[in-house]
Amino acid sequence: EVQLVESGGGLVQPGGSLRLSCAASGFTFSSYEMNWVRQAPGKGLEWVSYISSSGSTIYYADSVKGRFTISRDNAKNSLYLQMNSLRAEDTAVYYCAREGYDSSGYFDYWGQGTLVTVSS
Amino acid sequence: AIWMTQSPSLLSASTGDRVTISCRMSQGISSYLAWYQQKPGKAPELLIYAASTLQSGVPSRFSGSGSGTDFTLTISCLQSEDFATYYCQQYYSFPRTFGQGTKVEIK
């Protein structure tokens, strides 16, 4: 069974940093592209970042470029999101999402999400 | 970036109704479109990809159509478990983008 479990969310002050993790199991993690998607309270879905299966190709949304860093450790079956210079507008539930087979671009499995709250 | 206009934002319907949700792109994306269902407090779930391919395990009352710039999600006979919010998503190019969402509520 495919499982994605996020952790690392919490309350952080504006300007602070946080590192999210996503532990993957039930599939060959190193064969799949991964993404982070977020959802502000009561709002819609916003794609945040993409990383290829090898980690060699990375993309970011303009709203987080230069502040967030996506990475992965295929030996540990884990995906990460380092978030720096956090702003109030980064407050959201952050989901890790697996892309479908063969670099499809749609998201076939999602984690349960971890809440990040940026507030003083 | 490719902009998406999803409509309506709110849809009031009754069990057994046929409902249709539209997603229009700012430029052509071939068939690189997915549809998701999200229930309160839960992660989104994939319903349809490649505009019209049903994800494994998704009931056949869900269907998708369209290509290029105009796409449609249809629920042929609304069930109680279908009251939720639906999102379209394009994966033709980066940045990936989602529609604004359509909440299907009980009439």
Image: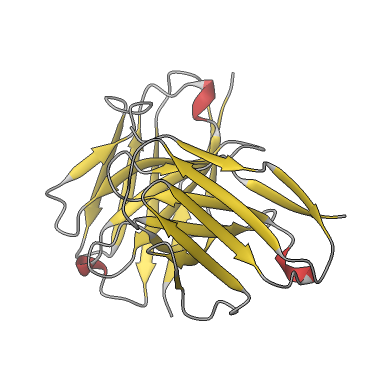
Q: Residue at x 32, y 38 (%)?
A: B95
Q: Is B9 displayed left or right of A113 in the figure?
A: right
The part of the image, by quadrant, that contains residue B38 is bottom right
Q: What is the quadrant of the N terminus of chain A in the image?
A: bottom left
Please provide percent x and percent y for residue B70. Answer: 46, 48
Q: Is residue A9 visible to us here?
A: no
The part of the image, by quadrant, that contains residue B41 is bottom right
Relative to A64, is A44 above or below? Answer: below
Q: Is A66 displayed left or right of B5 in the figure?
A: left
Please provide percent x and percent y for residue B43. Answer: 56, 57
Please provide percent x and percent y for residue B69. Answer: 40, 46
The part of the image, by quadrant, that contains residue A98 is bottom left
Relative to A89, is B13 above or below? Answer: below
Relative to B3, is A120 above or below? Answer: above
| Number of marks | 0
Comparing A67 with B103, the one in front is: B103
Q: Residue at x 65, y 47 (%)?
A: B102
Q: What is the quadrant of the C terminus of chain A in the image?
A: top right
Please provide percent x and percent y for residue B59. Answer: 60, 79
Relative to B106, is A14 above or below? Answer: above
Outermost residue on the right side: it is: B107
